[in-house]
Image: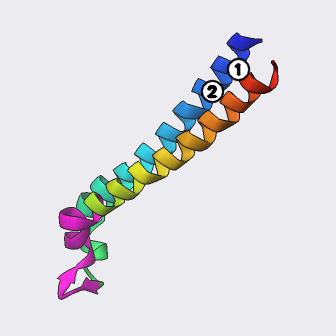
Amino acid sequence: MEKDKSKAYWHQNIRYLIILLSIWFITSFGFGILWVDELNQFKIGGFGLGFWFAQQGSIYSFVIIIFAYVFLMNKLDNKYSNQETNKD
């Protein structure tokens, strides 16, 4: 039973990592390099949106992703630690 809980925990953890790292890849590589010309049609502070993502946006999104990961992992830890304490 404990092994199943451990597998479920790590499966959910890996799912979170894949989703969050995919978002980071899209915002840093996709918006900053691949789709920069399309995004540069929009301006932020006088600079193209693609340039902004390459310089600042990917950093901001990475910080947001860190906080999202902390929130999700705290929730996941609480879920599985409550299951362990409830069995006693």
Q: Quadrant of the C terminus?
A: top right
Q: Which residue is mark 2?
A: 9
The correct choice, above or below, for 17 with respect to 5 in the image is below
Q: Which is more toward the observer, 18 or 33?
A: 18
Asked if the magenta segment contains residue 47, the reply would be: yes
Q: Nearer the viewer, residue 83 or 29?
A: 83
Q: Which residues are magenta?
A: 43-58
Q: Residue furthest bottom?
A: 46
Picture quarter containing residue 37? bottom left
Q: Quadrant of the N terminus?
A: top right
| Label disc, if present, on residue 77 of the rendered structure | none
- Residue 85 position within the rendered picture, expressed as x and y whole percent measured from the top left: 74, 25
Asked whether residue 18 is drawn in magenta, I would say: no
Q: Which quadrant of the figure has residue 21?
A: top left
Q: Position of residue 23 (x, y in %)?
A: 43, 52
* Mark 1, other Cα within 10 Å: few <14 / some 14–19 / many ≥20: few
